Image: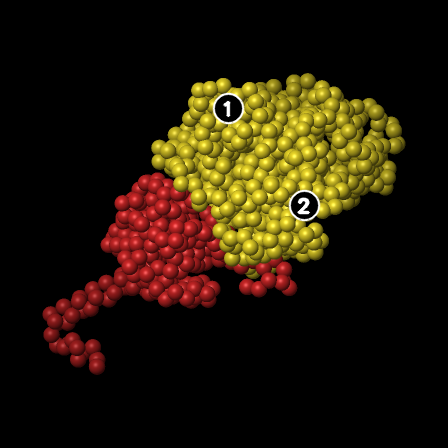
Chain colours: A yellow, B red
Amino acid sequence: MTQPLESNVLPWRILWALGIHSAAIIAYQLTLIQLISYMQGYHFAYMVISIAMLGFGASGTFLALFRSWLIGNHSWLIPALMAITAIMMATVFMGSLHPAIRFDAYLLFVDKAQFLTLAVQYLLFFLPFFSGALAIGILFIRYPGAIGKSYFSNLLGSGLGGLLVLFLLARFFPERALSIIALMAVSPAVLAYHPTRKWLQAGLIVAALAVSLFSFQKQTHLPVSQYKSLSRTQNLPEARLIVRKPGTHGVIEVIESPALRYAPALSFNFSGQVPVKPSVFVNADYYGSVHSLVADQTHIYNYTTENLLYAALKPQKVLIAGAGTAPGMAHALFNGASKVVAVIENPGVKNLIAHELYAATDARELPPQARLVYSDVRQYLYQNAQGQYDAIILPRQESFGGSIGIHALREEYALTLEAFGQMWKMLSPQGAISITSWIDFPARTTLKTAITLMETLKNQGIENPGEHLAVVRSWGTMTFLLKKNPWQQEQKQNILDFCQEMLFDVVFLPGTDREVLPVYNILEDQDLEEILGKIFADDYAQLLKEYPFYLFPATDNKPYFSRFMRAETLPRLRTLFGVENLPFLELGYMILWVTLLQSTLLAFFLILLPLFRLKKTGGGKIPVLVYFGALGIGYMFVEIIFIQRFVLYFGHPVYAITAVIGTMLIASGAGSLMSGKLMKGNHRFYLPVVAISLILLLYGFLLTPVLTLTIGLPFAWKVAIALALIAIPGFFMGMPFPLGISWLNQTFPGHIPWAWGINGCLSVIASSLATLLAVEFGFRIVIYAAAICYGAASLVYLRQKPTL
Amino acid sequence: MSFEAIVPYNHPMLNSMYTTILQRFFAILLLLLPLLLSGQNHQRQRAEMVESQIRSRGIRHQATLEAMNRVPRHLYVPSNQQRFAYDDRPLPIGWGQTISQPYIVAFMTEVIQPRSDFRVLEIGTGSGYQAAVLAEIVAHVYTIEIVEPLGLQARQLLERHYSNVSVKIADGYYGWEEHGPFDAIVVTAAAEYIPPPLIEQLKDGGRMIIPVGSPFRVQQLMLIEKKDGRITSRSLMPVRFVPFTSSSSN
């Protein structure tokens, strides 16, 4: 049996090196996600990074297999690996852009050769995480006596790395941020320098500096997938990039071209000139077109179903919730609104619209009755709950031609039942909510929108929901109006006149016999209108159970409005549409499953491999697997759920991620530091994991109510509450890992690398598993699952009864 | 008949000459054989494509079926995609574009009910395949491509095989007024709106067809009809989706 290593005092410069090294790894990971999101899309970034992160797990496996040699040479290996990590950070990304191995995610399901390039990309991105985690793992295992301090340094550094990324991405383009991080990653190698094999270390450090400086000064052109809207727009004649700015929400770009126009589902009755407008892109995805903010001409939207609101009613106070590039503002002003508030959720876009682009398109001031606000929509609703609006306009849903389901995993808190309830309360007696959707096939978004509006009305105790709804469609879009009071006859006539003039069709209008109305846009498949008829007749219970797509309205507990996939329907859809077309139905959901499966398979392999070496080193394998696996899953579950809950709380994913990751890691670091002192000689070794279980169980019941109660408070108060709510479990969650390592050091020191690997592997699986569970069952279930994980860890303690 | 009967063994010079000629003939045959076989192979694949992907899905317009059988689709895809040319799916052709699935091309062709005297406008030449299929049937195809490299490539290919196709590299928004009005308009490069000039250039009684979907999946096809000055749209589904197994008929 391997003898336990003696406890060592870790020099401060090594702790600093570890902290900076950890910060660099996390900052690199987050920046890489931004870069791949920009070039390919967020879901593919997620997929690639999940494999890259298995580098952590693989480092544990490697350590378990080659422990003696690695630990025996730790003094020069640690700085060498840190320098290698910096080299990888500077070179791997540039290498991945080489045309021979360049990957286009959109071709993955069309061109089998892309699987090979994907595998190469996986390997490339895997390397820096592997070398980085190996350095950390060697350090943990070589100095188990100082695990509390080293884990604290690791966690604190990781937390600060997350904050660093926010700072960098706000000021630098992601490719430049990456090279800055690579430069930063050289310093740990210098700090951890050891006289053994000095020339090797010196050579690696110099090489790391050289490549990092080279990548910093090099202008990297980022190849965007040819199927992303930015690329396709750049192919237009005389396309010109007029703005490019970095941002924490993504890179903002504006392109102009004489061929760029936007007029969603324009009426056939329009005979004028569709105006040419520049387009805004965020992370290479179309965000909106730049319209005049001043109403001095016919607005093109007057010839779309979105004008239904103004045709039926004459709203004076208009709220445009999630205004994108605010084309609705001029539309509202043109139609006589006396007060228009446009809430834009991207601060960079809001500033661009208000200051730069506006000045480029119109030389006048924003009219006094118009206001551009940067805020999350739900936050705005909470903070302005007393406001009264005649119209609340939501962003257009889906996209022309279908979004292929890439938004399936996006939390859309502005489209939950709770959000509609808030909006309802803010409507004046004659007010209405307007929501427009592109008509998708098979029908999903339109149906879910209809059901959500019906459920909203029923939640408000409205007995005849149909009296409050009007729905109109063109050849491409469908607009729903949800009115506070029942429709009046004059308003209904206005709607009919509007439809006749614009060649639109009435889908639903209470008291109207559609059979006598002319049909301008014939649907070959009558199912859509039949089903909508049933929904508006409040007969959709069977539909919710049997429809091949998921149509239940989104709630704050499951805010995935664009999630439609049902696993049980997959075989039928495959038969109907063909296996090649299936990914283009609901790509986001399928990518999540692919990510989960591939990381599970690889993790399984990585965890099993060391067992062949360990079988001779005695028992304890099951407890190690359960304990460290449970910690890896539980920690990640809590982190992800906290991020999702606090996105709603702060109304800003950036603030949420900063608060959660920063606080959790720092609090866990503090817990790690205290763990040894608190538990020394204490037989009740299991107390921290039991405490975590109980706290999480409590949070399952109380977290959402507490957040709901306090969400309207001033920002400073919310920050304090959030820090407390996160830090309490976070502190305790920092203890079990170092305590477990200390325990292993005394009983089965040979298992320590394997434990590190298990923890790393299962953390990676947990990130996609948590999202899947949240999408399927809601956030609360994930918190309970995390509580169960820590409960399982406490059972290990109770059986093993370790002491320190 | 023996070789000796063909080549008199007792004449060495003739023997040598005949041998050389025969050797060279067989060598050339061996060289050309893959080409001959490949041509027959593509033809076979085309016939199979028409039967299994197009006719079996209900396309009945004879001229369309014949055109699909004649046009060598593999010439309209990049060389690295040629082995998939007759597969039942769209294929990438670069610049963020795809060549449509064969069935969709056939469907769109049939829907506009093409006749031999038709003048057809196509917006979005892309690979040129749809224009080639149309050119087999109608009097003249006018096709516009906004992406210059694609347009030039398609022009080269189409003008080599067809004298009744005109390719223009321009913004399709404005149509091709000088050659209008058109009996049919095929808008393969669909946008979020239907440009008013195209409606203007559609003949009364004419049909416009627009596929709606992502590059790799066509969700539906919009058929725009102009009759007595009135415009109507009809949404057609290439793949019928029946939401409930016990209701709605195909």
Placement of the C terminus of chain A among the 4 image quadrants: top right
Horizontal and vertical percent position of residue A691:
83, 32
Horizontal and vertical percent position of residue A514:
58, 53
Q: Which mark is drawn over residue A352?
A: 1
- The chain letter for the residue carrying disc 1 is A
- The chain letter for the residue carrying disc 2 is A
- Does dot 1 land on a helix, a strand or a loop? helix
The answer to whether the residue labelled 2 contacts the one labelled 1, judged by CB atoms less than 8 Å apart, is no
Q: Which mark is drawn over residue A467?
A: 2
Q: In this view, does A310 lie above or below B75?
A: above
**Residue drawn at point x = 65 percent, y = 20 percent:** A16
Q: In this view, does A461 lie above or below A389?
A: below
Placement of the N terminus of chain A among the 4 image quadrants: top right
* Residue situated in front as seen by the camera: A570 or A617: A570
**Residue drawn at point x = 47 percent, y = 54 percent:** B234
Res A620 quadrant in image: top right
Between the residue at mark 2 and the residue at mark 1, the CA separation in whole angstroms equals 41 Å
Res B17 quadrant in image: bottom left
Foreground tag (2 vs 1): 2
